[in-house]
Image (cartoon, rainbow, N blue to C red):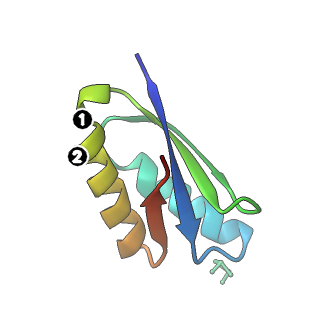
Amino acid sequence: MTQMVDFSISGMTCASCVRRVEKVIKKVEGIDEVSVNLTLEQARVGLHDPKLLQQKIGEIETAVTNAGYKATWIN
Ligand code: 9UX
């Protein structure tokens, strides 16, 4: 069962930024779907295995940081 997880994303200013952030999050293993909203400055991520929640949050935050943005888990 896919678990949806939301992140606040800072540093995005254009549509290319959105595509970059979506791309790096999709590369994290175990991510089923990603939708980034520039206006809300948020990403909604579908996580394949809810048991890996804490691990995947860390991996997503690191991946987004390495791309030059900042992700913070919401909730
Ligand atoms: Mo366009 Mo978004 O240079 O940084 S990708 S503003």
Task: Report how many numbered discs are placed on residues in the image.
Answer: 2
Left or right, 60 with reference to 39: left
Does mark 1 have its CB less than 8 Å from ligand 1? no
Kindly identify the amino acid type of the residue bearing the numbered disc 2: Gln
Q: What crowding class fits label 1: few (fewer than 14 Cα within 10 Å), some (14-19), or many (20 or more)?
A: few
Percent of width and height locating residue 63: 35, 63
Give me the disc on residue 68: none
Residue at x-position 57% and y-position 52%: 43
Mark 2: which secondary structure? helix
The residue nearer to you, when weighing 21 against 54, is: 54
Mark 1: which secondary structure? helix
Residue at x-position 48% and y-position 46%: 75
Residue at x-position 57% and y-position 72%: 10
Percent of width and height locating residue 22: 54, 54
The residue nearer to you, when weighing 21 against 61, is: 61
Give me the disc on residue 52: 1
Give me the disc on residue 55: 2
What is the quadrant of the N terminus in the image? top left
The furthest residue to the top: 1
Residue at x-position 31% and y-position 65%: 62
The residue nearer to you, when weighing 29 against 7, is: 7
